[in-house]
Each structure stands twice: as structure tokens, then as C-alpha cells.
Image (cartoon, helix red, strand yellow):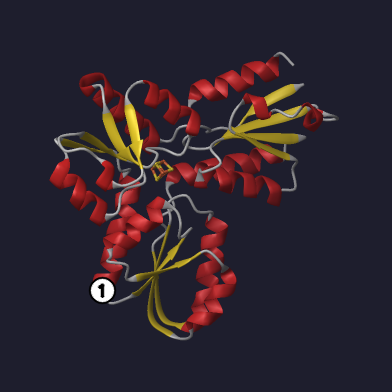
């Protein structure tokens, strides 16, 4: 069996930066709090928890005088306000590309546009973007919803950083007939676009693709979606125990891809297991 690794794959710039800052803080302070997962990979989060990371569900749960890490995909302003009141120190791991999406959203609102955010309304990044504009925006994750908006005078569009460019394009095309004026910022990050292109390229060369990444990871979910669109057999796993032996039958060339929050140690582990099958 031949294995081909997607290029690039695994940790992106923003996650690498966030993990480095978080590990430095853990080395210095021993215990660091995060509201929700700092990155969307359960195995890497577990490794960090073993070093002293404490993941809580809300800002209210953080004890006074704590060191708090703000996750790569940003935090709601209200939660940040509470954290500022309680924390001894805040380490901001928010990715610059996420900050950029928040700034573009604020700009569009300030300029009088009706704001549309292409993304998943339940994703923390999208909630943080909405929070940054006091919830003055509409999240689109369903093309059928577009017909419900009616005519829009000035339409401003941004995207969750990990969306698919095809879906962003479809939303823009769908809204055009309803808008007098449209302004679009493509805020999908470079790392996401590169990984999406890499899996398309990989799909043309393999009999099946294994995608490694958290089931809660938006960018990994997009990789899985793209692989399915390319009609290539796909196995999305978080760890090695999900390697189903039946899936490998009649496959000679296997592609391996991983989401932007999948650590190298996990990719290497699964690759090693596959090399010795
Ligand atoms: S996927 Fe993009 S936006 Fe998210 S952390 Fe990585 S570089 Fe930043």
C-alpha cells in the first residue's frame, strides 16, 4: 500500500502560534484556564490538560487571579469583559486572521452595510464575530435561506475563516439579485484555502483518503466535505482506533490529510501504523 501525505497538512500558522503561547504559559504558571477548547482537537487538548490546562464552559467558572488563555478562534466580548475583571493575566491566542474577520465585520457595520457572515452559527468564531458587532449581523449557512431576506440596499459579506470558498461564492451569487450594492471581504484564511486545494489535488491521485482531525473542527469538516464532493472514498478519524480494516480493501494508494488543528505527533503516529499494515 502506498501512502501520500497532503501538502500542506496539519497545524496552521494560527494554531502553531496559539499552542506555543499556551505551552509557554503552562511552563511558567503550571495552571492555565481556557473557556472552551483552545483548539479543536481533543487529543491535543488532552495532552495540554495533562500539562495543567483547565477547560471551563463559561467565564463565570474562572477563579479570581487565574491565568486565562483566549482560544485561537476568539472569544465573545461579554466573556472577555468578565475575564478581564477576574484574571491575573490574559494570554490572547486569537489568530490574526480571526481578528481580521472581526475588524472587517465592524467596518461594514460602521459603513452602514447589512452584515452577512457566511459560516456556522454555532461555531465559537462566528459567535465571537457577531459579538464584536453587538449581534448586528445575519449568519448564513444554508443557501435556501437567501430567498427569505428580500431586497437589501447595502449588503456586506464576510466569511468564517474556515469556510469553503465554493460555498462563499455560492452565497455571494445567491445574494447579488437582491442587493443594490454589495461589498465582499473574503476572510477565509490562507491556511484553510491551501488545505482545501491540497485535498482536491490529493483526491485525483489516490484510491481513498484518510482525514485526521477533531469531529468538532470546522476546517477538518470542510476537508471531508470536499473529499466527498470529489467522490473519493473517505475515512474521517480522530485517532488510530477508528482505522476500520474493511475500509482498506481494494485500495492500493491511500492519501492522508489532516485539519489545521491536528498535531504532527498524531499524524506521524497514524502514518507509522499505516506503513506497517
Ligand atoms: S485555520 Fe486559519 S484562522 Fe484558524 S487558526 Fe489557523 S490560520 Fe488562523
Left/right placement of residue 269 relative to residue 242 reads left
Q: Is residue 134 above or below residue 262?
A: below
Q: Is residue 100 in view?
A: yes
At 69% across and 16% down in the image, what residue appears? 275
Q: Position of residue 35 (x, y in %)?
A: 32, 42
- Quadrant placement of the C terminus: top right
Q: Report the residue at 39% width, 21% height from top.
A: 50
Q: Is residue 58 left or right of residue 123?
A: left
Q: Nearer the viewer, residue 146 or 203?
A: 146
- At 79% from the left and 29% from the top, the residue drawn is 248
Disc 1, SS: loop
Q: Is residue 262 visible?
A: no
Q: Position of residue 126 (x, y in %)?
A: 40, 57
Q: Left or right of 75: which side holds 159?
A: right
Q: Which residue corresponds to mark 1?
A: 111
User: Would the CB of label 1 be found within 8 Å of ligand 1?
Assistant: no
Quarter of the image where ligand 1 sits: top left
Which image quarter is the N terminus in?
top right
Judge whether 148 appears above or below 171 on screen.
Answer: below
Amino acid at each position: 500500500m502506498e501512502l501520500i501525505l497532503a501538502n500542506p497538512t496539519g497545524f496552521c500558522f494560527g494554531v502553531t502560534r496559539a499552542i506555543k503561547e499556551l505551552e509557554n504559559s503552562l511552563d511558567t504558571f503550571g495552571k492555565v484556564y481556557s473557556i472552551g477548547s483552545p483548539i479543536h482537537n481533543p487529543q491535543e487538548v488532552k495532552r495540554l490538560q495533562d500539562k495543567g490546562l483547565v477547560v471551563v464552559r463559561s467565564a463565570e467558572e474562572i477563579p479570581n487571579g487565574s491565568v486565562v488563555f483566549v482560544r485561537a478562534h476568539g472569544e465573545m466580548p461579554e466573556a472577555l469583559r468578565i475575564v478581564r475583571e477576574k484574571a491575573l493575566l490574559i494570554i490572547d491566542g486569537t489568530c490574526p486572521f480571526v481578528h481580521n474577520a472581526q475588524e472587517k465585520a465592524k467596518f461594514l457595520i460602521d459603513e452602514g452595510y447589512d452584515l452577512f457572515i457566511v459560516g456556522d452559527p454555532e461555531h465559537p468564531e462566528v459567535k465571537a464575530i457577531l459579538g464584536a458587532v453587538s449581534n448586528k449581523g445575519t449568519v448564513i449557512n444554508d443557501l435556501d435561506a437567501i430567498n427569505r431576506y428580500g431586497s437589501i440596499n447595502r449588503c456586506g459579506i464576510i466569511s468564517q475563516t474556515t469556510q469553503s470558498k465554493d460555498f462563499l461564492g455560492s452565497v455571494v451569487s445567491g445574494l447579488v439579485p437582491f442587493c443594490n450594492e454589495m461589498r465582499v471581504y473574503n476572510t477565509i484564511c490562507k491556511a484553510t484555502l491551501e488545505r482545501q486545494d491540497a485535498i482536491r489535488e490529493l483526491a485525483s491521485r489516490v484510491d481513498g483518503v484518510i482525514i485526521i482531525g477533531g469531529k468538532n473542527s470546522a476546517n477538518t469538516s470542510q476537508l471531508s466535505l470536499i473529499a466527498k464532493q470529489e467522490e473519493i472514498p473517505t475515512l474521517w478519524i480522530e485517532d488510530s482506533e477508528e482505522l476500520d480494516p474493511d475500509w482498506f480493501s481494494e485500495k492500493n494508494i491511500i492519501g492522508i490529510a489532516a485539519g489545521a488543528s491536528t498535531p504532527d505527533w498524531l499524524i506521524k503516529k497514524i502514518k507509522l501504523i499505516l506503513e506497517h499494515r
